[in-house]
Image (spheres, rainbow, N blue to C red):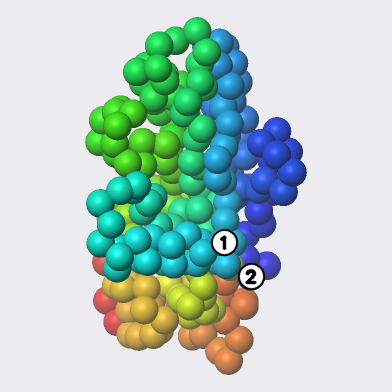
Amino acid sequence: MRYAPLVPVPELGAGAVCAEDVHAPLLAWMAACVAHGGRLRANSLTRTVAQQQVLRDRYVAWLNANKPAPEVAVANKPGRSNHQGGRAIDVATGGAFPAAPPDQQVDLLWATGQPLGWTPIIAQPDENMSEHWHFDFWGFWRSVRDHRGYDVGCLCSALDVGQAGEWQSDERLVQALLLRAGYDIGDVDGILGARSQAAIVMVTGARAGSSLLPVIEALRLRPVASAWQTVHP
């Protein structure tokens, strides 16, 4: 299996999908909202590369026009957003909890989502901040995010499901999966250098051949690392 599957989330609308390990935490968050008198609704869940490119083009056009208002939501390049990896949701925050005051909607989303692993992208709950609606579920990629940073974590999650756009390649997917398994092989640059090759030998017992699919399949069987190994070529 080259790519991890995306699974349907019909509770959030026709065509809604997410990464496989995100599904249960997403349903759990929906249930937690109901228990607090609310309803979790998605303005955006998983996006294709093409859908992300439309938003990116709109954002870049707004920046180039130097317009003060209205603000256009920040949109990263396709493959650099957790929306491609099936690990991000833009929540419809207005009226999510009908009985609560307007200035407590985001607070309640944080209170119900964070214990389940949903990470806000902003530092504090504030309805007036851009991206107050965006939450990530890192799951298998949390250690990569923590060790290598947000952008690399997003790239790896997108590579995992085959939605990294211009960065999608088997070589980068191998590097992402090596990082997930805890092998600190350097950048996800698509060049299987000495450290990547050494890590592949550690996992498979042999150097990568002309087809990387056996390496990818072997790496998918590796558990997510709880510690990092320095790889020496």
Furthest residue in direction top, as rendered: 99
Which one is in front, 88 or 208? 88
Dot in front, 1 or 2: 1
Counting the numbered discs, the total is 2
- Residue marked by disc 2: 2
Q: Residues within 10 Å of mark 2 (few under 14, many from 20)?
A: some
Q: Is residue 229 visible?
A: no
**Could one spot residue 123 in this view of the protein?**
yes
Residue 98 locus on image (x, y percent): 52, 13
Observer-nearest of 12 and 178 = 12
Q: Which type of secondary structure does the marked residue at label 1 adopt?
A: helix
Q: Amino acid at mark 2?
A: Arg
Give the percent coordinates (x, y) of residue 121: 34, 42
Helix, strand or loop status at disc 2:
loop
Give percent across and percent down for residue 160: 54, 63
Cα separation between marks 1 and 2:
23 Å
**Residue that lies at the very extreme toward the bottom in this rendered image:** 210
In the displayed structure image, the side of residue 119 where residue 49 appears, left or right: right
141 left or right, relative to 36: left
User: Where does the N terminus fall, quadrant-wise?
Assistant: bottom right
Closer to the camera in the image, 35 or 75: 75
Where 56 falls versus 232 (above or below)?
Answer: above
Mark 1: amino acid: Gln
Q: Residue at x 40, y 17 (%)?
A: 102
Location of mark 1 (residue)? 51
